[in-house]
Amino acid sequence: MKTQFIELSLPTRDGQFIARYSEKGLAEMDFPKVGSARRADRTLRRSVPTNIVSRWHRATEAALKYILAGRAAKNLPPLDLSGGTEFQQAVWRELGKISPGQTRSYGEIAQAIGKPKAVRAVGGACGANPIPVLVPCHRVLAAHGKIGGFGGGLDWKRRLLAREGVSL
DNA sequence: GACAGATGAAGGA
DNA sequence: TCCTTCATCTGTC
């Protein structure tokens, strides 16, 4: 039984993000694909009432624009993190606590979830994060302020951090 | 099981 | 500094 997603586009001044919603909330988000005008921005499934999804989508769009502007999102849509393991969900929840303009190291995240030695695993969980930007994995740096890596590309990470006033 | 990974620390040049 | 090596933990195949 595969989860059915409702896929909607999120046009921003930085490109067109793709958001996918499950019956529980926002489940995935993609960065804009360079040079691809992805067709069919909505593959509606009957499993989720469209009025609920459109409400989530408005919240997602507003939150995304706030974060891209380097500010804290006022209202986040419900996030469906059930696609991850318990460990990954713990990491993602911890990421959600980081305020704009603040950064943490992988080691600090590992400590915060009570597994100070699981630093590499935290990196893995960040890479597996299905909802970049809203789950701010870009605010996690390697030790000593090094940028580390980023699933959506280091350019995005630098850009997002710069908008929040973080200098590397 | 084996292996890889968005780490981190230590040691040597 | 920079590079290499190794310990460590988790997820994936």
Image (tube, coloured by chain):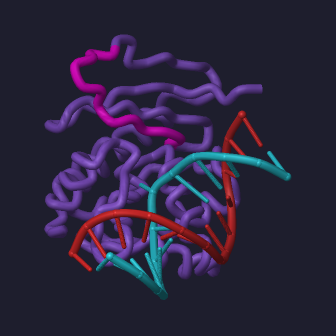
Chain colours: A purple, B cyan, C red
Image quadrant holding the N terminus of chain A, namely top right
Q: Which residue does the image show at 59% across and 80% down from the upper left?
A: A116
Q: Give the number of marks.
A: 0
- Answer with left or right where residue A45 lies relative to residue A154: right
- Answer with left or right where residue A158 lies relative to residue A135: left
Q: Which residue does the image show at 27% across and 53% down from the upper left?
A: A157
Which is nearer the eye, A23 or A2?
A2
Which is nearer the eye, A39 or A59?
A39
Magenta span: A26-38
Q: Position of residue A79 (x, y in %)?
A: 52, 50
Magenta stretch holds residue A35: yes
Rendered image quadrant of residue A151: top left
Which is nearer the eye, A56 or A147?
A147
Q: Position of residue A100 (x, y in %)?
A: 27, 68
Magenta stretch holds residue A95: no
Which is nearer the eye, A44 or A126?
A126
